[in-house]
């Protein structure tokens, strides 16, 4: 495996002739993209966000780093001309994003490849990224990998958290009406319609993931419904996951019933995955890029940071 430092040294060592063909980091990353696809003999697309490398910019332009409808353009470009009979390996590194965009993207990918899609998670696939992983027939993870709760966000506010807060308030006020003044400032932040939207978002996400699990990961399994319900309960119960940022390890995912394959079972495959991961992270760290979508042939969609300017 080319580790973090070795990938960086490889980029720096590219001679002028190679740099004339394109950016050094692009050449190195595409080498590892092609190597992983050659090893698996499957189509390959990386979907990477630079939110960890650009935390200051995330606060200024959160939409640049999260999953949105605009990402479908990148996937369309990457999938064009692919031999779809070879299936798809989707390498995910994302904080998540819009639920509607996630639903649309998963439906598009399934129209292109059916359910012959594997998710590979080298480090983090959170929130909507977890939903995408659970829509695949198999998830490849290592000891270093994490998924996250299926906890829809509305305006960067966890829907589960809002619902739990209102339930707690209702219980406390019912038991002791004198606590109404304590809760009034909190109630003032949310309209009744917002509470309803939160509940709808939670129900929508749960129904969506349940259906994807039944028709994908557990297709043909006589216990598909009960297995899907178990996973959605474990990943979607805010009382269990505690926080939207909670990291769910490979061991926890396996205990919940997710069809997980440990990268450590194939050291050469793990080396190929992590070499590609390091190259993608270096790409985003050393550029103005917010997101990268690219296939094994080097067809890429590069989203730069979009900062809103005040009038």
Image (tube, rainbow, N blue to C red):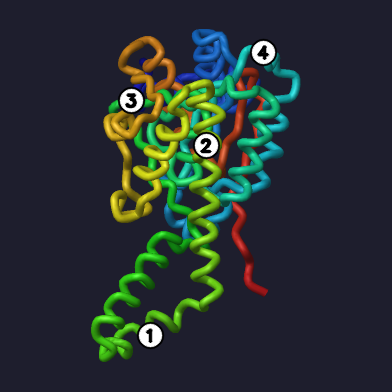
Q: Which residue is mark 3?
A: 142
* Distance of label 4 from label 2 (alpha carbons): 20 Å
Tell me what residue is drawn at x 37 percent, y 26 percent: 141
For residue 304, which numbered disc appears in the image? none
Report whether 143 appears left or right of 293.
left
Q: CA distance from mark 2 to mark 1?
A: 37 Å
For label 2, the crowd category at 10 Å Cα-Cα, with few meaning under 14, some 14 to 19 and many 20 or more, is many
Give the Cα distance between marks 4 and 3: 27 Å
Q: Earlier in the sequence, mark 1 or mark 4?
A: 4
Q: Disc 1 versus disc 3: distance between alpha carbons?
A: 44 Å
Answer whether labels 2 and 3 touch (C-beta < 8 Å).
no
Q: Nearer the viewer, residue 85 or 171?
A: 171
Residue 291 visible at all: yes
Find numbered disc 1 in the image and state the secondary structure of the residue it sits on. Answer: helix
Look at discs 4 and 3 and give the one toward the viewer: 4
Asked if 23 appears above or below 1 in the picture, the reply is below
Task: Give residue 250's position: percent from left, percent from top.
Answer: 31, 30
Q: Quadrant of the N terminus?
A: top left
Query: Which residue is located at x 48 percent, y 77 percent?
Result: 190
Q: Quadrant of residue 261?
A: top left
Residue positioned 36% across, 19% down in the render = 263
Residue beneath disc 2? 132
Residue bearing the label numbered 1: 185
Image quadrant holding the C terminus, namely bottom right
Tell me residue 301's x, y (percent).
65, 35
- What element does badge 2 sit on? helix
Q: Earlier in the sequence, mark 2 or mark 3?
A: 2
Q: Which residue is mark 4?
A: 85
Residue 227 placement (x, y as % from top left): 40, 32
Q: Earlier in the sequence, mark 1 or mark 3?
A: 3
């Amino acid at each position: 495996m080319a580790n973090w430092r070795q990938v960086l040294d490889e980029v720096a060592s590219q001679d002028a002739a190679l740099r004339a063909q394109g950016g050094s980091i692009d050449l190195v990353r595409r080498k590892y993209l092609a190597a992983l696809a050659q090893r698996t003999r499957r189509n390959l697309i990386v979907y990477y966000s630079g939110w960890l490398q650009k935390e200051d910019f995330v606060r200024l332009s959160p939409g640049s780093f999260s999953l949105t409808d605009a990402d479908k353009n990148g996937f369309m470009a990457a999938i064009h001309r692919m031999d779809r009979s070879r299936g798809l390996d989707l390498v995910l590194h994302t904080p998540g994003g819009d639920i509607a965009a996630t639903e649309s993207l998963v439906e598009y990918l399934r129209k292109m490849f059916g359910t012959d899609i594997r998710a590979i998670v080298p480090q983090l696939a959170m929130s909507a990224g977890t939903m995408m992983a659970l829509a695949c027939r198999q998830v490849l993870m290592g000891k270093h990998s994490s998924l996250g709760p299926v906890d829809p966000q509305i305006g960067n506010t966890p829907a589960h958290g809002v619902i739990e807060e209102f339930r707690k308030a209702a219980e406390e006020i019912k038991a002791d009406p004198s606590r109404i003044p304590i809760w009034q400032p909190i109630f003032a932040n949310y309209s009744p319609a917002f509470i309803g939207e939160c509940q709808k978002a939670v129900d929508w996400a749960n129904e969506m993931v349940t259906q994807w699990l039944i028709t994908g990961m557990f297709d043909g399994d006589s216990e598909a419904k009960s297995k899907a319900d178990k996973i959605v309960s474990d990943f979607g119960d805010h009382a269990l996951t505690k926080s939207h940022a909670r990291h769910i390890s490979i061991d926890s995912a396996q205990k919940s019933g997710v069809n997980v394959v440990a990268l450590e079972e194939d050291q050469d495959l793990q080396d190929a995955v992590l070499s590609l991961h390091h190259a993608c992270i270096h790409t985003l760290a050393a550029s103005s890029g917010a997101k990268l979508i690219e296939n094994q042939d080097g067809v890429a969609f590069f989203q730069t940071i979009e900062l809103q300017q005040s009038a």
